[in-house]
Image: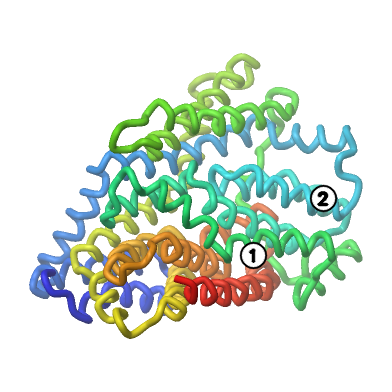
Amino acid sequence: MNDPTWISLLPPLLAIGLAIATRQVYLSLAGGLWLGWTILNGWHFGAGLMRTVESTAEVLGDTGNAMVIMFTLVMGALIATISASGGVAGFVAALERRRWVTGGRRAQMLAWVIGVIIFIESNLTVLVAGSVSRPLFDRYRNSREKLAYLIDSTSAPICILIPLNAWGATNLRLLAEAGVPEGETLGVFIRSIVFNFYSFAAVLLALAVILFRLDWGPMRKAEERAAKGEVLWPDSTPMMDEGVLEQTGEPPIPARASNMIIPIVVLVAMMPVVLWLTRSESSPFGNGSMAVLCASLAGLGAAWIMMLVQKAYKVDELTRIALRGAGGLVPLALILLLALALGGVTRELGTGDYVAAVAHGVLSPAIFLPLVFVVSSVIAFSIGSSWGTFAIMIPIVVPAAAALDLDLAPFLAAALSGGIFGDHCSPISDTTIISSMAAATDHVDHVRTQLPYALAGGAVATVCFAVAGAFL
């Protein structure tokens, strides 16, 4: 649109409204996408629908987008392969033999540390930390709600701070599509890290909860129940996807920690290698999309080689395991596909330019910066997807910051931080749901016990963004 108006706000607003009414992230994103293309096609709903389908398919025509979506599926295959190898069980056994965990506080610290050091992919972080720590939490009578909170607070909040993973690759791609020159995207992202106040608040608050036993409200009651040996509340229903989180039956080989550690180490180590190999004049820091895909394939390859050398599985069995794991993350890949498509139509409508024009001369940075954080939080809470929120907000904040002649980094951080905060609070967030699954706790109980901590971190972040905005 040459001269965007308030109408350009309708697609993201529809996405939010549908999310609140239906609690369906796919329907919400698709509805906003359809409305956007309907507007661009002169309010012709049929033409808008056809263009919606076409534009969604065009997302895969971009090599970077396709590689990030492929990475999601490969990570599902890797998670399933590590589970089937008995690597998680071997890692727990190694901890017990070395007596590294001898009490409840050390079990909590283990969950926190795993969440911090496994920063490649949030679901991998949650699944590994939950699978390793859950038996220890039960043994030392810590509540599973506490475990769900700790792994949820050190998954997405840590992943968003690291540019060299799927989260970084996705946001670098969104920045490039929003108009930031390809060679500057990584620099902008890195500068935004220091302003990502909610992520720091969430991670540090989780550590303080462990060190100082800061059990508030529903969490205190859950800890008191667990201290009596009651794993769950009488009427609760644990969310446990046996096909993804647990090895069904006895593994064909002895459980070895190396079967989990080595593939993850290979994955992490390959990231900087591929980034260095893919450097170019236009991308001096390397190709992030290529790096995360190649690194995940390397990790999966290492896991397969280890299974074949140990004669645990044949190639056809490994293929079935990998396909099952990839299928488990298809919903996340679909969210990413729709999110990228919605970001494209938002740019076509000029939503960011309109917001910038409205804000120019009206809102000071001290108000505009925390406002971006709050709006991102509301969107993420409504649709249950931080990645979907990034796709909505980044195309808005990039031209808005440029039009206001302000540094993009803190506004990017506000959008990303708000996406994490809203996702952290949302009961329909995939990360929140998977955290409940990994901890084998009731999902409603996890949301109730985590919410007071998330709101405390959000309040701190809002104040920090207001203070930062005052100095812009």
Image quarter where the C terminus lies is: bottom left
Residue type at mark 2: give it: Ala
Q: Find numbered disc 2 in the image and state the secondary structure of the residue it sits on.
A: helix
Type of colouring: rainbow
In the rendered view, tell whether residue 270 sits above or below residue 124.
above
Where does label 1 land, which residue?
Answer: 201
Answer yes or no: is residue 455 visible: yes
Residue type at mark 1: give it: Ala
Q: Is residue 357 left or right of residue 139?
A: left
Q: Pick the residue in front: 197 or 136.
A: 197
Q: Quadrant of residue 371?
A: bottom left
Q: Residue 138: give x, y in percent of width and height.
A: 83, 54
Q: Quadrant of residue 266?
A: top right
Q: Quadrant of residue 278?
A: top left
Q: Residue furthest bottom?
A: 362
| Cα–Cα gap, marks 1 and 2 | 22 Å
Residue at 43% from the left image edge and 34% from the top image edge:
291
Where does label 2 land, which residue?
Answer: 107
Q: Pick the residue in front: 241 or 141.
A: 141
Q: Find numbered disc 1 in the image and state the secondary structure of the residue it sits on.
A: helix
